[in-house]
Image (cartoon, rainbow, N blue to C red):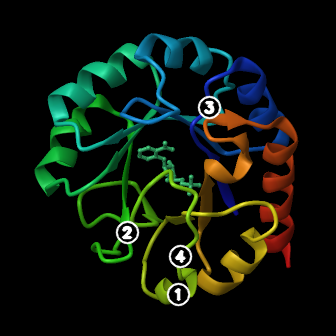
Amino acid sequence: MYVKICGLREPEHVAAAVEAGADAIGFVLTRSSRRVTPERARELAAQVPEHVLTVAVFAGEGPEQVRAATLASGVRAVQLHGDHPHGDFTALRDLGLTLVRAGAAGVDLRCGAFDEDLLIVDAPRPGSGEPWDWAAVRGRPSGRWMLAGGLDASNVAAAIDAARPWGVDVSSGVESAPGVKDTGRIRDFVTAAREAAAG
Ligand SMILES: O=C(O)c1ccccc1N[C@@H]1O[C@H](COP(=O)(O)O)[C@@H](O)[C@H]1O
């Protein structure tokens, strides 16, 4: 089970996610209580070992703005939320980074349909922490896709059982208050996701 922890802002939480065994770590570079500057993302990404994917998260910005901020941040993947045309992903392909498309259950659920490498199927309001009907997408997405939206250590096993994703992605559910990550919750989430996947 691939596990991504998103919205990290502090070195101790990046370290906690890496130590817990996260596969990917996200830095939010768009409007959000979790927003960091590209320069801050670069500092945080520098402490992440090669085997953990670092991801810059955007929502609605155009490809040129995404390109500039991504290059400034030094991350290895770009995550685009919102109604992006196929051309936005193609325009970023030359960066040589992993491209991640994120959208709610109504979007095209075939990973790769927009030239992306990974797909995230999320709640209607990304980053809100609101659970949704995860079972509604069971059997529908194809390829390498992550379930997101309202997950936490207490419900991730049920969510995995309901939707059968390739991976899971969390932000609010590993926080003690909005925008404030919690080391113990990060560790508990990764453990719960891996135990659920192991059966
Ligand atoms: O986390 C944010 O603040 C955010 C803002 C804008 C776009 C995406 C954002 N995060 C993504 O939202 C989900 C996690 O949501 P939840 O808080 O766990 O319910 C995940 O895809 C994040 O990458």
Q: In the rendered view, tell whether residue 131 sits above or below residue 168.
A: below
Please name the residue that numbered disc 1 is placed on. 138
Image coordinates for residue 192, horizontal then vertical, percent = 84, 63
Q: Nearer the viewer, residue 198 or 108?
A: 108
Label 3 element class: loop
Real-space CA distance between mark 4 and mark 1, rounded to the nearest whole angstrom = 13 Å
The residue carrying mark 4 is 132
How far apart in space, not on screen, are marks 2 and 3 (Cα)? 22 Å
Earlier sequence position, callout 4 versus callout 3: 3
Mark-to-mark CA distance, 2 and 1: 14 Å
In the rendered image, residue 27, in percent from the top left (x then y), is placed at 51, 32
Type of amino acid under label 2 = Ala
Q: Dot 1, how many residues are within 10 Å of its Cα: few (below 14), some (14-19), or many (20+)?
A: some
Mark linked to residue 8: 3
> Callout 4, which amino acid?
Trp
Quadrant including the C terminus:
bottom right
The residue lying at 82 percent from left, 72 percent from top is 196
Horizontal arrangement in the rendering, residue 71 relative to residue 92 (left or right): right
Residue 197 lies in quadrant: bottom right
* Residue 104's disc number: 2
Disc 2 to disc 4, C-alpha distance: 10 Å
In primary-sequence order, the first of circles 4 and 1 is 4
Q: Decide which of tag 2 and tag 4 comes sooner along the chain.
A: 2
Q: Nearer the viewer, mark 4 or mark 1?
A: 4
Q: Nearer the viewer, mark 3 or mark 1?
A: 3
Can you tell which mark lies on residue 12? Answer: none
Categorize mark 4 by other alpha carbons within 10 Å: few (<14), some (14-19), many (20+): some
Please provide percent x and percent y for residue 157: 77, 74
